[in-house]
Amino acid sequence: MKNKINVAEAFLVSLIYLFAFYFSVSGLFGQTSKPEEPSFCELVREPTKYDGHLVRISAQYSTTAHAALIAAKSCPSSSTEKYFAAPTWSHDFDLAGKNAKSLFKILRDGGTADVTFVGVVRALPHEKYGFYDAPVQLELKKIETVKRDPVP
């Protein structure tokens, strides 16, 4: 009977270590349940710091004839620095949701939207994203708020 207890204890300890390893590794890749909340300027000025991280960002979402952009009036691009992000939709994003429909309507009417969303940052060193070679790509998972920007 003593050997069975030792085997059971060893199995239980192994299981605990396996769970601990899994959760420590998942944290390394930034996939936590609570998103980080950097400012948009912090994100685009130090994009590799947030690569792979889940973030909540408030910014302006707009489209051109060629592509969509995420930018912030508080963090304008200069002639030497690009302070904008290229959006992409996560495979599990709800395109039929209320906030997504509101965003699409604003964009279809030619407007710009003030948006708060949750997404995963993609920002590898020396990598460019989207039509305009943005330094950051944001994989959108959820739109939390959306409203028409009164002054695009």
Image (spheres, rainbow, N blue to C red):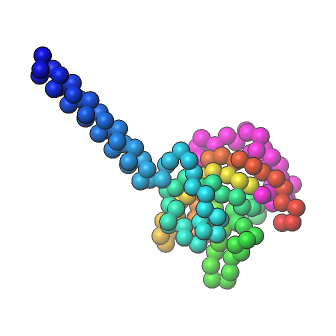
Q: Is residue 38 left or right of residue 111?
A: left
* Residue 139 in view, yes or no: no
Quarter of the picture holding the C terminus: bottom right
Residue 27, horizontal then vertical, whole percent: 43, 50
Q: Is residue 17 left or right of residue 61?
A: left
Residue 3, horizontal then vertical, whole percent: 11, 22
Please tell me whether residue 91 is drawn above or below residue 4 in the rendered image.
below
Q: Is residue 74 left or right of residue 29?
A: right
Q: Residue at x 71, y 53 (%)?
A: 116
Residue in front for this viewpoint, 57 or 124? 57
In the image, is residue 101 part of the stretch drawn in magenta? Answer: yes
Quarter of the picture holding the N terminus: top left
Please tell me whether residue 122 is drawn above or below residue 145 in the rendered image.
below
Q: Residue at x 38, y 49 (%)?
A: 25
- Give the magenta part as a residue range: 90-114
Please tell me whether residue 142 is drawn above or below residue 76 in the rendered image.
above
> What residue occupies the far front of the structure in this picture?
2
Residue 4, horizontal then vertical, whole percent: 15, 20
Residue 34, horizontal then vertical, whole percent: 56, 47
Residue in front for this viewpoint, 20 or 136? 20
> What residue occupies the far bottom of the structure in this picture?
79
Residue in front for this viewpoint, 85 or 31? 31
User: On the image, which quarter does residue 69 sit in?
Assistant: bottom right
User: On the image, which quarter does residue 113 sit in?
Assistant: bottom right
